[in-house]
Amino acid sequence: MKISVVMAVYNGEKYIEEQLMSILSQSIMPDELIIQDDGSSDSTTDKIQSITEKSDVSVKLIKNKENLGFSKNFITAISAASGEYIFLSDQDDIWKKDRIKRALSVMEDNENILALSSAFDLIDEDGVVIKKADNSKKLVNISQKEFIKHPKFPGMAMVFKKELWEYLQHNEKVDWESGIAHDWAINYVALKKRGMYKLEESLLCYRQHSFNTFGTAMAGGFNQKDKRIKLIKSLMDNARGIKAESQSEEKLLEGIVSFNEKRIHFYEHDRLLRLLLHEFAHMKYISLRSIMGDIYTNLRGRNR
C-alpha cells in the first residue's frame, strides 16, 4: 500500500514549516509528498527544500512557470501522485500525529469508501483553538441531500483512493475549465458511487486567517459581502463543471445554478426579505446555517 500526500502552495512561508513538520512526523509516514508551488514570490520553496532535504519520505517539489490558481494547481499536483491513497493538504494547517493511521484504518475496514473526509478543529493565526470538532468517531455515508445543502467537506480534510481520480480523468465527467473546485468534484463523483463518507473525528487543525475563506465561514459566517458572494459563485462553478448523465441530474445541477444566481441578485441589491423568501422556498439547496450566515452578512453590511 502506497500513501501519497499532495500539497499546493503559494506564498506560504509563514506557516509552511509547521505544516510540513506535522506531516513528516506522522505515526505512519507517507511514501511520497508531492508539493506544487504556484509561483511563490516569498521564501516558501526555500523553506520546503530546507525542511525536506533530510527526510526519508520521497519529496517532489514542482515549481510552476506560470500561476495556475488554487484549484488547477491542486489538480496538476494530484495527477503526479502515484499512491493508492491520496491525502490532500493545505500549506497552513497542522495534522494530528495519527491522521494517516486513523484514516487508513477506517478506509481499510470499509471497502465501500472512495473518499473520506474527517472533522477538524479550527485554530487562529497563532494556533490557538477557536472551535473544537465533534469527536463522536461516527462514520457517516454522506447523502446527496446533505452534500448539496451543506458544502462543508474541504479538500484539506480529505483522503481518497487513486482509482477514483483515475475514473475522473478517464471518463470525462468533469469540465476542469469551468472553475470547478477539485475537492467538490472528487466528493461529487464519490457520492454518485455511494462512496463518500465523513468520519466525525478531528484528525487535523484547520487554520483560519485573512487569506482563506472556508475557515472564515466555519468561524461564524462571512462578515464581508464580497467574500460571501465569491463563495456562492463557487457553488455555481461547481455545478456547471459536472457533466450530467441523466435528466434528473441535469435538473439538479441547473437548479443549484439558478437558485444561487437569484441569491446573488438579491444580495447585490440589498433585498434581504426577498433573499430570505427565496431561500426558505428552496431549502433543498441550502441549510439553515447558511441562511443565518446570509442574514448576518447582509445586516452587518448595512450597519457599516
Image (cartoon, rainbow, N blue to C red):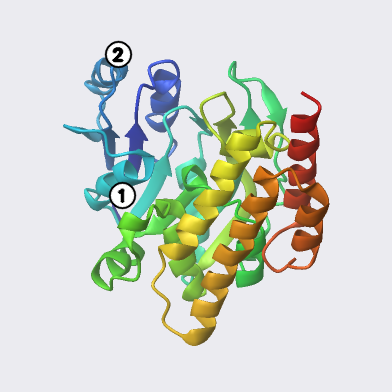
Q: Residue at image x 27%, y 65%?
A: 169
Q: Residues within 10 Å of mark 1 (few under 14, many from 20)?
A: some
Q: What's the residue type where badge 2 is placed?
A: Ser
Q: Which circle's residue, 2 or 1, is located before the other in the chain?
A: 2
Q: Quadrant of residue 149?
A: bottom right
The reply to whether residue 30 is in sight is no
Name the residue that disc number 1 marks.
75
Q: Which quarter of the rendering shows the C terminus? A: top right
Disc 2 secondary structure class = loop
What is the number of the mark on residue 98?
none
Q: Which quarter of the rendering shows the N terminus? A: bottom left
Q: Residue at image x 65%, y 44%?
A: 268
Name the residue that disc number 2 marks.
43
Q: Residue furthest bottom?
A: 247
Q: Residues under labels 2 and 1: Cα distance?
A: 23 Å
Q: Position of residue 225 (x, y in %)?
A: 65, 36
Q: Residue at image x 52%, y 74%?
A: 194
Q: Position of residue 297 (x, y in %)?
A: 74, 37
Total marks in image: 2
Q: What's the residue type where badge 1 is placed?
A: Ile
Q: Position of residue 186 (x, y in %)?
A: 42, 60
